[in-house]
Amino acid sequence: MSVQTSAFSLTPEEMKSIEDKLCIKKKLVQAQADEIFSVFREPLSVEEEWALKFVYAYSPLQDLADVPGSLFLSHVRSTLRMRQEVPWGQRVPDDLFLHFVLPCRVNTENIEDCRAIFYEELAERVKSLSMSEAILETNYWCHEKAVYTGSDLRTVSPLTMIRSARGRCGEESTLAVTALRSIGIPARQVYTPRWAHCDDNHAWVEAWADGTWHYIGACEPEARLNQGWFTPPARRSMLMNTRVLGAYHGPEDVTLATEWYTELNLLENYAPTKELTVAVKDLAGAAVEGASVRFELYNMAEFYPIAELLTNEDGEVVFKTGYGDLLIRAVYQGRWREHKITIDQTDRLELVLDLQNQPEQESGVIDFDMVPPPETEGEELPPLTGEAESLHQQRLSEGTDIRTAFEATFVTHKESIDLSRELSLPEARVWDVMQKARGNGQEIAAFLRESSPEHGQWPLLLLESLNSKDLIDTFRPVLHEHLDYSLPLRGMLPDTLFIPYLLCPRVAFEMLGPYRKQSQSAFASDERDAMVREPSLLAEALKEKFIPWEDLPNLKGKGTAAGTYRIMAGDEESLAILFVALCRSLGIPSRLHPSERKPQYWQKGSWIFADLGIKEKGKQRMGSIRLVQNESKGNMPEASYYENISIARLVQGKYETLHFPFKETKLFDEPLPAEEGAYRMTTGVRLKNGTVRARFTYFHLNEGEESCVAVTFRSTDEEIPVLGTVDKHTELRWQDENVTTLEHSVSGTAAGTLLSWIEPDREPTMHLLKELADLRQELAERNISVVLITGSAGTGKSLKTEQLEILPSQVRLGEASPASLPEVFRSSGATESGYPHLVVLDEAYQIRYVSSGYRIGAVREAIQVSSQLAGQRSEPFQHDGGSL
């Protein structure tokens, strides 16, 4: 190749690297290469050519399969045009432009041609602003478009989020990054893989302005940069990541560098850090190169690897992390060793592997504590002027009004009823679908009108088989394809198999698209007939043709089934999803095993594991696990999956958590089917300071046998100090406009009452409301009064009807003046943490529990304290255990 002059200050070596990556991609897509890369035959300027090459070289392989070249070209041209038009376009260095403005992908969202759309909306709003002001203004725009709500793991696209007007933090930050990039501002999504002090994670945004990176809470504007409700929790984190496509060589710390992407460790921007060196050796003291070192912390009842690094030629890895506890696990060729460490006591850890003998899993019960980094106070920011605060609140209110007006255009209850009667469909079921479809409701209604007259309830059954998000970003052509190509197969199966495992197009968390017509025409009729009789033939055909390939770890299994089939290459999850999709297209009921997540097909009355050549494939050597929990004593919790209990199987030296529904409590009704092997059950209870009292219970499961495992928790009894008081004469204005004092609003004694000052529409408050809803049964059984107070932030906001509907009946909502906030919440730490502020009162209106800001699990902690104050406790549960 001749040396060329690049439009983006690329060196000859960098240009050659891009060309080499393109060659690799062309070989991987094989017969489809001419079509996929045809866009390069368009007339292109030098700048367009190299921007397009960069996008193609570093986009995940699945994107090349799913995204038309015309979309990539449109994206590139829009981005280059915008760079010329925005006032700061030429001030952004080429390196930052290529890595943080040009890329289409932010997270695992579906790629859409939205850059020009966003630029059209934002350009006039920011053209006279500085870069810093433009970042703030863009976030106000995002707030107008969407607000936080919890949802499943699939990340919807920015356009879909706008259509829905809400999304989780990963989707909020994807929207904000996309919007900022659309006006030429370098932006990246920052996330903590898992918090150390509570059971959740979070994502936000960093944006670059005139030489400096700043952070914002996506769709949650503040009046200035580098401020957000997540600032105090971030100081307790163990890792902050951002993933950059390509070989990025900026000044930030690098967690992991591959030839396709770079993971940056941004923790130092938010929290105190320390470097830990882990050395892996064999029994002779020789370095073990290529060993996997997993840095695991307790979160959601499992030990989750926040980072996994390979040892160098010296057998070492270096990891920068926070001042909390980690479980370090080294794995090499199926051998392993693990050790729990406290970071502030350790600079170097050596793990020795016996490479000659196969290790055996530990046995019995092991107890240990996992301590998160301590709470620390940040730098106190100067107060905003009254004018600045007033303007900010006005902007928030205006944004809420704009978003609310858009939501008013969604299909109404009356319109849904009219549709139901027009099509003779059940009113409640149609309304349930319409509510979930949100801004896509008219599209869903049109699909029902077009298909229900011919097919009756089957179009509705198809919609009901989908996840809520599918109803927001799936359109009529896709729905018609799946309906039309599946209904002719209906008579072959009972509805209990047909609806979830053949009619339903959803397999896991992949992007839905049409695939049945393509799948049915992919094989000759005699091949199809043979595969229907013996689905293992389909598995063999895929295994023979499929090329294993992974580039982005978080994108595994997220592309479309049609795209995976088109290039016949990808990761194991995508192959499994493709197999299930092909089976369903051919009339073979198929699924991913509920807990193992491996492909199965239905044959002769039972589920059979498909052999796709995947490591540790299911081999039908199955047994069952029966969990036995003794009656709760003291404050022992009820077992709830991913909340305080999980089960993991040992696979090639690593524990892989079995998948059961989040917060599933019905784990004791029936034996749980599972593959034979070595298992570890994790139980844990988190204390108020974030420390987890963890317990490992080891056991084995043999083929055809049932293993009974006792579910036990460690004691969590703690002293309940007096932390302040609440004025019982505080006046509250209730929803019926009556005004009473707090003393007269609490029925009976105040002992155990939960009192919370909230800020509607902000993510921390949304988490508290969801926890109240999730724990409605426990609140009712313990007869705990809950009072929510709004208006304390001076915004006059109140909860929406849909928020009120999910709350337990004993929750009351009132308004009070800012002066009602107790003194305990006037410290700098509580002020920085922000709303919600939660307390538990005793009979003398003394505060016995406090929580400020974002704290997952605060409601459950408050319930435990309330129960103790009300005398609902017995002797602490005693246990025996080892130590780790």
Image: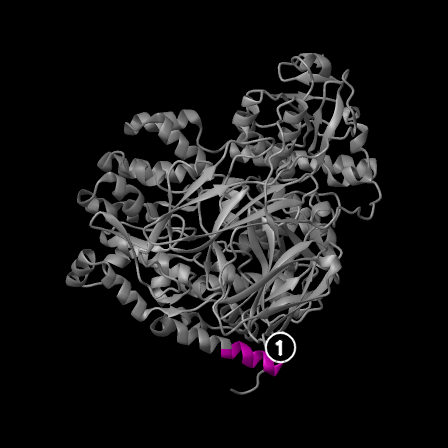
The image's colouring method is one colour
Residue 819, quarter of the rendered image? top right
The amino acid marked with disc number 1 is: Gly
Q: Check disc 1: other Cα within 10 Å, few if <14, some if 14-19, many if 20+.
A: few
* Residue linked to disc 1: 285
Please tell me whether mark 1 sits on a helix, a strand or a loop. Answer: loop
Picture quarter with the C terminus: bottom right
Indicate whether residue 96 is drawn in magenta. no
Whole-percent x, y for residue 144 in the image: 61, 40
So how many labels did they put on this image?
Answer: 1
Q: Residue at x 53, y 59 (%)?
A: 105
In this view, the residue in front, 497 or 373, is: 373
Determine if the magenta segment contains residue 17: yes
- Return the residue nearer the eye: 877 or 820: 877
Decide: is 777 above or below 530.
above
Counting from the top left corner in percent of width and height, residue 865 is at 66, 29
Position of 716 with respect to 640 (left or right) is right
Q: Nearer the viewer, residue 418 or 752?
A: 752
Q: Is residue 826 above or below residue 158?
A: above
Q: Main secondary structure of the magenta part?
A: helix
Q: Residue furthest bottom?
A: 2
Outermost residue toward the front in this view: 880
Task: Give the quadrant of residue 66.
Answer: bottom left
Q: Position of residue 447 (x, y in %)?
A: 33, 40
Residue 515 appears anywhere in the view: no
Horizontal and vertical percent position of residue 177: 61, 54
Does 750 sit left or right of 492 as displayed? right
Extent of the magenta region: 9-20
Q: Is residue 85 visible?
A: yes
